Amino acid sequence: MRYLLLTIVSVVFYSSSAIAHDGLVQIKSSHDVKVTADRLEQVLNAKGMTVFIRINHAAGAEKVGKMLRPTELVIFGNPKIGTPLMQCAQSIGIDLPQKALISEDEAGQVWFSYNDPMYLAKRHEVKGCDEVLKKVSNALAKFSAKATSP
């Protein structure tokens, strides 16, 4: 019974705060774009991940006289995890390192988006890396939760 209740709560929470479509996981953030990206960068650094670059797309658009709602991309990873995935299917390297897009929609809602590792596994026909994929999926879920939660 307890398991059933936890499952129901998880489904309700997930469905109300996250969307998964065509391999893209999107989670509502309780913060603005900058704060969400800052929180993500903090949790990544605390977990020993490498943050390769943080791109402010809105600032780039402004430089060429264009308007873009707040949008930042954080590119991060860890070769201890990425390398085994590429050993299973080298083509997955086109989708690595991991990326998180934090953006504000037209209604002012901030979204944290990333590629679903299971979708990438299907895309690249990854075989024999189930444990690594599970680890990546769990880590991304935790990182996104810490970045987006109140």
Image (tube, helix red, strand yellow):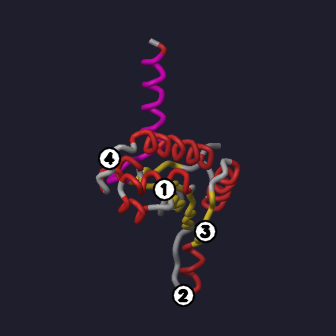
Q: Residue furthest front?
A: 87
Q: Return the mark for residue 53.
A: 3
Asked if labels 1 and 4 touch by Cβ distance under 8 angstroms, the answer is no
Q: Which residues are magenta?
A: 3-23
- Report which residue position mark 2 lands on: 64
Give how far across and how far down residue 115 sits, in percent: 42, 55
Q: Residue at x 44, y 12 (%)?
A: 1
Mark 4 → mark 1, Cα distance in angstroms: 14 Å
- Disc 3 marks a residue whose amino acid type is Ile
Quick one: label 3, few (<14), some, or many (20+) residues within 10 Å? few
Residue 99 vs 116, above or below: the answer is: below
Q: Nearer the viewer, residue 29 or 22?
A: 22
Residue 150 vs 80, above or below: the answer is: above
From the viewer's perspective, is the residue at label 3 or at label 2 nearer?
3
Mark 1 → mark 3, Cα distance in angstroms: 19 Å
Q: Residue at x 52, y 43 (%)?
A: 141
From the viewer's perspective, is the residue at label 4 or at label 3 nearer?
4
Quick one: label 4, few (<14), some, or many (20+) residues within 10 Å? few
- Report which residue position mark 1 lands on: 83
Of callouts 2 and 1, the N-terminal one: 2
Asked if labels 3 and 1 touch by Cβ distance under 8 angstroms, the answer is no
- Report which residue position mark 4 lands on: 127
Q: Is 30 on the left-hand or right-hand side of 122? A: right
Of callouts 3 and 2, the N-terminal one: 3
Q: Residue at x 50, y 40 (%)?
A: 138
- Disc 4 marks a residue whose amino acid type is Lys
Q: Residue furthest bottom?
A: 64
From the viewer's perspective, is the residue at label 1 or at label 3 nearer?
1
Of callouts 4 and 3, the N-terminal one: 3
Residue 72 vs 87, above or below: the answer is: below
Q: Is 107 on the left-hand or right-hand side of 122? A: right
